[in-house]
Amino acid sequence: ALVGAKIARNPHLATVFQGVDFKTHNFEYKLIAKNQSESDTIRKMIRNFKYAMAPNYQPGLNDHIFQYPNEFDITLAAGEYLFKFGRSVLTDFTVNYTGEGVPAFYEDTGAPYSVSIGMTFKETSIVTKKEISQGR
């Protein structure tokens, strides 16, 4: 009967607020080395990010307790027009050694010509209206 009258019953849907998650931020970069020194720098950057995101064992506890991975304070150089980040941990780090879509390596060193990296950071504190009103 309702279809014939071209009307529909309101389902009165409601949602229950159950909290918020920690904010995540994704970054993607393509790094192209022009010489061996830049290839070495890219390799060091990759190793440093991988190292920083890994936990360590608490000394003297027979490898049963982890210490937290490193935290990051992220600042973008674009000034006040971009939002600010809270202290974060690196939760995902990907490396694609074929940044141009095909394998391309320097013949003399074997270093990749182009590397794409992806990083996912998760903030370690919840953002509320208070933090946003303070510029975060």
Image (tube, rainbow, N blue to C red):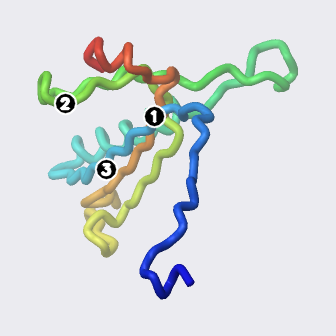
Q: Is residue 110 above or below residue 79?
A: below
Left or right, 56 with reference to 82? right
**Residue 86 or 112: which is nearer the viewer?**
86
- How many neighbours does mark 3 have within 10 angstroms: few (below 14), some (14-19), or many (20 or more)? few
Q: Which residue is mark 1?
A: 23
Q: Which residue is mark 3?
A: 28
Q: Residue visible at 23% across and 47% down?
A: 36
Tell me the element at label 2.
loop
Where does residue 9 sit, x and y in percent of width and height? 54, 67
- How many neighbours does mark 2 have within 10 angstroms: few (below 14), some (14-19), or many (20 or more)? few
Q: Counting residues from the N terminus, which is met first, the one under dot 1 or under dot 2?
A: 1
Q: Which residue is mark 2?
A: 82
Tell me the element at label 3.
strand
Image quarter of the N terminus: bottom right
Q: Is residue 30 above or below residue 103?
A: above
Left or right, 120 with reference to 103? right
Q: Quadrant of residue 111?
A: bottom left
**Residue 27 or 54: which is nearer the viewer?**
27
